[in-house]
Amino acid sequence: MAAIRNMEHRSPDATPSIYFDALAATPCLPEVVEAMLPYFSQSFHNPQSAYPPAESALAAVARARDQVGRLINAPPRDLFFTSGATESNNWALRGMAMHPRRRGQHIVASAIEHLSIVHPLRTLERQGFQITWVVVDALGVIDPASVLAAIRPDTALVTLTHASAELGAIEPIDAIAAVCRERRVPLHVDAANTAGYVTLDPIGWGVDLLTISPHLFYGPAGVGALYAKRGLRLPPLLEGGTQEDGRRAGTENVPAIVGFGVAAEAALRDMHSRASRWLPLRDRLRDGLAAIPGVRITGHPTQRLPHHVSCLADGVESEAVLTDLAMRGIFAASGSACSAKAGQHSHVLEAIGIGADIRSGALVFGLMLETTAAEIDALLSALSSTLAGLRSLAPRV
């Protein structure tokens, strides 16, 4: 099998491109596209209208809710569709901040959160909330004891990522959730990067809120979901109609929701076989990168996403590396896609103690369903050549 290739973009030697940026976006599976298509044309009806075709659209939304619920082992009645992970994260944070029974105006988060957590928290901070940023270790792992130490009598919420796109380390959410239950503090988990790749169990863990999105596990962009524990009456972020049990207004994006459901069903069905295929490829890439002079791996060596490898390349700028790789037909990333063009140093790498002079050489590689060993080797060869060439151009001191 060949990896995802865009035949309209070719490297100078006319070889097809190879995609290693699955932490930013993935293509829809053919079965996802096939399921979505009728809802753009024949079954276009508004699910809230009162006639049979509309009821069929509403039934499709309900079916997708069941499929997504099975992926995260949660009752579909506790799942609410949104426009994506960013909205789900914002809703969790702002909703809990507005909750009439919150304990106070203190929130705990980790220092490696996604910007869709960081920016809303900064806004809440300007509105009078106090935020405690929990440190992580050098591998990007959160210590549950640090979360416990950060919780105060007035803590209204703990919000943590399940895995950072920049580091790939999977956090011990079950242990952290136990700490939060002990202190009776609600816990929100941003699982956008782990959904579809590892088993999620918000009820078993004791998580109160959980964010997921299908665009990273071969479903459509522009749709997401927020799991909210039964009994947690989260105030709506968007007000208007009665959609989503009156919790999230707005006409349902039926095609995307249907695609979400099919992608969730496929991810649940194939999760173990995908991981079994990815793990040796991931380790091949990790070991190959570690063998390149001036390259060091970031994140936990084993407690990480099965398709993720990240590293630092000394003495080069990430942008220059990625540009040169793209010219060779290889597409990768330097961090979170939501901050890739911001021109700022990564707060995530700063949190694990990486200095600003080294952070500029950060690289992130996300394997695709069809990535091959030959493509891993092609990346390693190209990267070695790229780094040698860029370093030869660096001014000598």
Image (cartoon, helix red, strand yellow):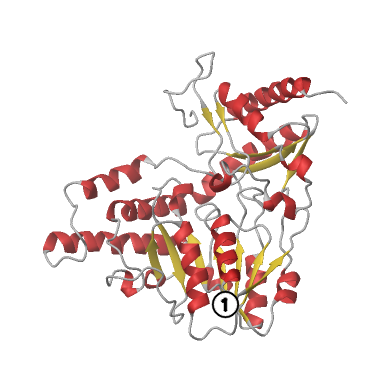
Residue under pointer 1 = 186
Instruction: Decide which of 258, 123 is in the foreground and name it.
Output: 123
Residue 194 in percent (x, y) is at 55, 55
Compared with 64, 302 (above or below) is above
Of all residues shown, which one is farthest toward the top?
13
Q: Residue at x 41, y 69 (%)?
A: 237
Circle 1 SS class: loop
Q: Residue at x 50, y 31 (%)?
A: 3
Of all residues shown, which one is farthest toward the right?
397
Q: Is residue 2 visible?
A: yes
Q: Residue at x 39, y 51 (%)?
A: 222
Q: Residue at x 51, y 66 (%)?
A: 210
Compared with 212, 183 (above or below) is below
Q: Quadrant of the C terminus?
A: top right
Badge 1 amino acid: Pro
Instruction: Decide which of 70, 119 is in the foreground and name it.
Output: 119
Position of residue 242 in the picture relative to residue 52 (left or right): right
Residue 231 in percent (x, y) is at 44, 82
Residue 341 in percent (x, y) is at 56, 41
Residue 48 appears in which quarter of the rendering?
Answer: bottom left
